[in-house]
Amino acid sequence: MISYQDYLQLLPKTELHCHFVSTMNAATFLELADKHGVDLWGSDPETLFDFADLVDFLVGFRAAHDVLRDPEDFARVAWEGVRDAVAQGNLRYREYYVNPQYFAARGVGYLEVMEPIIAGLRRAERDFGVGFAIIAAINRRDDAASAVEMVRQVIAHPLPEVVGIGQDDLTPENTEDPTRFAAAYELAAAHGLKRTAHVGETDAATSDAVRQAIEVLGCERLDHGYRITDDPAVVELARERGIAFATTPVSTTICSDWALDEAHRIRAMIDAGLMVTVSTDDAMFFRTDLGREYREGLFAMGVDAATAKQIALNGITGAFCDDVRKDRLRAEFRAQFAALDAVLAPAA
Ligand code: ADE
Ligand code: ZN
């Protein structure tokens, strides 16, 4: 028999919201920094990942991109990240945010980033059976014209693995302001790219950012989206449109100081019937992993086994992959659920 927390950790999972750089493990990060002579924002591994808030974290997050320079760096991080997530949380499929503008600013071009990442992820798919897709992230610190240029690059270099666009970081004013990038989303939509965005995450954000991402940007999925619970009309809109939410319970708690309990906004989103999925966002930086997000995050929010399995299945429905892969994943998940249900210790 296994405990409920072990059960949560062992459930088969997808991950729809993680930033490629954040899937690195800390040892590799320090090794690559050393390799390239990169001065990190601190040198003590004990405190390197202590961040005051989202804005403080983003300073380190941007800087961390510096350690990825050679093709073998990208390919190694890609492969190791899958290996680690399979061991930590039974990962079966993953979608990655990659921010080409961060790398361009460091002189590393679009294909120089994407091709070795894809090579590493393909090798991981062969070794661990974990499929993947990539979402090109608009860097909100850059302007709207630069976002359009980035989307043009995605279109000019079609890679079957790069299936959509998103937006991350914050604007120079530390806001979300999703519609600033409406032209880039329009272009992406016209070329059949899927659309997501980080919205409704920060203290300053409102449910209106969530509404705009759905209505103006045409997003099929949203990252975070927590402020939605402030407006029942936006909740209704998201439910009607079948919008998936890539939430990150443990990560978000570190950035927001919200208590991880039954009153958490993510629990309210689940109870409101929204299509909630669970991811790590920035595992290395927030000292979390996919297993922990379920084991500690869902557990602390009082999520029961039936709902946890539904959340895992939502992670298939909300994925940007084709129906053949989705059907295969659903069959695999259902078989693993049955095996896990059979050994779950009855509640005390
Ligand atoms: N980039 C990486 N993690 C992020 C987050 N949580 N919000 C905005 N941009 C990010
Ligand atoms: Zn994110």
Image (cartoon, grey):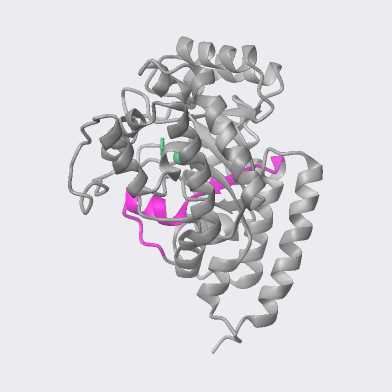
Reply yes or no: does residue 35 show up in magenta: no
Q: Position of residue 278 (x, y in %)?
A: 54, 53
Instruction: Say which quarter of the image contains residue 65.
Output: top left
Reply yes or no: does residue 244 show up in magenta: yes
Relative to 32, does residue 299 appear above or below in the rendering? below
| Image quadrant in which the N terminus is located | bottom right
Q: Position of residue 186 (x, y in %)?
A: 63, 17
Q: Position of residue 147 (x, y in %)?
A: 49, 16
Residue furthest bottom as drawn: 348
Camera-nearest residue between 199 and 150 = 150
Instruction: Say which quarter of the image contains residue 11.
Output: bottom right
Q: Can see residue 285?
A: no
Relative to 97, does residue 269 appear above or below in the rendering? below
Relative to 52, does residue 161 appear above or below in the rendering? above
Q: Position of residue 105 (x, y in %)?
A: 37, 17
Question: Residue drawn at (65%, 35%), measured in percent from left and top?
Answer: 220
Give the residues drawn in magenta, as a range: 241-260
Relative to 56, does residue 101 appear above or below in the rendering? above
| Image quadrant in which the C terminus is located | bottom right
Count of picture labels: 0
Question: Residue drawn at (65%, 42%), measured in percent from left and top?
Answer: 243
Q: Can see residue 91?
A: yes
Residue furthest left as drawn: 43
